[in-house]
Image (tube, rainbow, N blue to C red):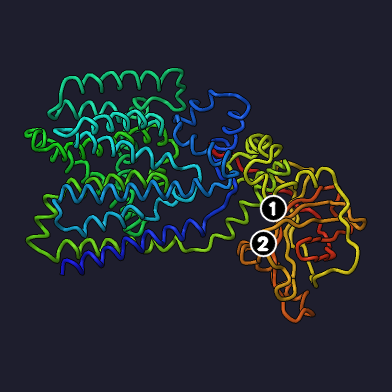
Amino acid sequence: MRASKEQLFGLFASAFAIIAVIGAVRNFSAMPYWDTLGGYLHFFVRVSDGDWSAWWAQHNEHRIVLSRLFFWADLAWFQGTTISLIALNYLLLGLLALMFQRLWHIAGQGRAAYVGLFLIAWMWSWIQNQNLTWAFQSQFFLVQLLPLCAFLALYKASGGPPRWFAIALACGILSLGAMANGVLALPLMLLYTLCTPCSWRRRALLLVATAAGTWLYFRGYVSGSEPITHVLARDPLGYAAYVLLYIGGPFYFFSGKGTFGLWFAGAAGLALIATSAVIALRALRAPQASTLPLALLAFILYLGGSAAGTAGGRLAYGVDHALASRYQTPALCVWAAFAVLLAPTLTALAARRPRALPAGLLVLLLLMLPQQLKALRNQDPWRFEVAVAGLALELGIEDADQIRAMYPRAEEAVQLADAPVRRGLSVFGMAPLKGARKDFDNRPIVAMTGAPATACMATMSAATMAQGDADYVRVEGLVAFATDGYGQPALRRMTLTDAHGVVTGIVLAAPVSWAPASWAPAASATDAAGRQLAEKQLIAFKGYVRTIDLGRSVKLVDPASGCQAPLATLAAAPAPPRRPDPE
């Protein structure tokens, strides 16, 4: 029976991890999404230009020194594909999952091992997908992993070899370079040593490290948000609700979201805080026998402090901002630590009622499964829209409506991308974007001698003035190819030329399955226009032409397939009213 339980939960753990990895493949795009543009590419440009202060400079409230090491390595050694950064995210999460399994083994004294396997599945939950699929997010894992290692090493240092204290101290110091909440690690480590048996020398070392680390971190620091005391005075209930939702966030997703999910998540957060406080009071009465529970409580307090700090800076975005995907990593960690903290109670329950605990955990896994399966969804339409946003940056076109798929502020995005584009960094030095600006600006003549190598027909379904740049028009449409006429790669660049072969526009093309659902009417029109082709392969395209070139005789040219399709252009519709940029 024991073996069957472990096999069942081991199967779930493996399945959740595998599904999460598939999600990485489904969601992968090397385009500089969101903070990646400034925090990854612009950082590398600054360092390459000799600005060494970029390493320690703030990114919002954070000094992400450790992640910047990996950013630099990806651009310097791996051509900025960001694959190494995605792999790093998964590696760090895997280490976190194994750490909690190991902690359960220690706290549970080898009993109910299936709970440790459950914790692995729990930690691989897809609700934290932003941290897994964004190349910029390794700091969200480092800022949980390093303090956890620090507290565990401090626990091992109690009566153990001196190296454990050295490891704890190193992890605490490194936490300063993860994110702003990493500053809490050293003070809480010092607090832990004051509550447990520890030599005065070690306490003195931690005191010095805490003082020096805090001074160094906040030297020259510029706060981007109002003080927490002001937030508390203005909206104490909203602040409390934010913290509770931050901590109970996973149960919002696993209980079906909605109003019930909000209340359930808040109640779960409150229950965790209250139960942890009761356990802390008991542990402090017998600290010598409670070194592991106190280490876990220190980590839970660390995550609670992270929630409190985040609420102070982000409550202005609304209470439900606490449920953002990126905040689910610390929330999953706090519940995993809480489960280990309850090991004596849970193992006793497992001994008294052998079926109750595994049944309850199995129900929870089944509730988690719908969220996990979202990792398998087709993300090609999103990847296509982000790629076209990348094309806008490559061409230097401030098309706010399109760039918003990648970055919230178009003007800032174009400025941040200018140097990476000119230097050919990352995606701007790889197909399909490489050289697009040169072709667009220089307007070369594309040779079109001989008959088209592939039978194809094209139609333009929409033409819209670029939102924020009246000199350019965003165009989209479809191409009908003969069977297998399109070939590979799936996402590639095509050119619009005039009757003389002069480049007038650049578009990106991909199979029509990559196009948003709103393109369906255009697909039907193209299908009707292309009935003469025995079998058709529909390809979507989207990109830019100059406003002055719209209305001329145009051809769509695909060098990869040899397609040369006459294209009737449309009058450009005005850009929709520009929405205000997000804060």
Disc 2 and disc 1 in contact, CB within 8 angstroms: yes
Q: Residue at x 41, y 63 (%)?
A: 373
Who comes first in sequence, dot 2 or dot 1?
Answer: 1
Whether residue 207 sits left or right of residue 434 in the image: it is left
Residue 441, position in %: x, y? 81, 43
Residue 547, position in %: x, y? 82, 48
**Circle number at residue 570:** none
SS label for mark 1: loop
Q: Residues within 10 Å of mark 2 (few under 14, many from 20)?
A: few
Q: Is 451 above or below relative to 181?
A: below
Whether residue 245 sits left or right of residue 4 in the image: it is right
Q: Residue at x 75, y 49 (%)?
A: 465
Most foreground residue, 69 or 100: 69
- In the picture of the structure, the residue carrying the numbered disc 2 is 489
Q: Residue at x 46, y 63 (%)?
A: 376
- In the picture of the structure, the residue carrying the numbered disc 1 is 432
Q: Residues within 10 Å of mark 1 (few under 14, many from 20)?
A: some
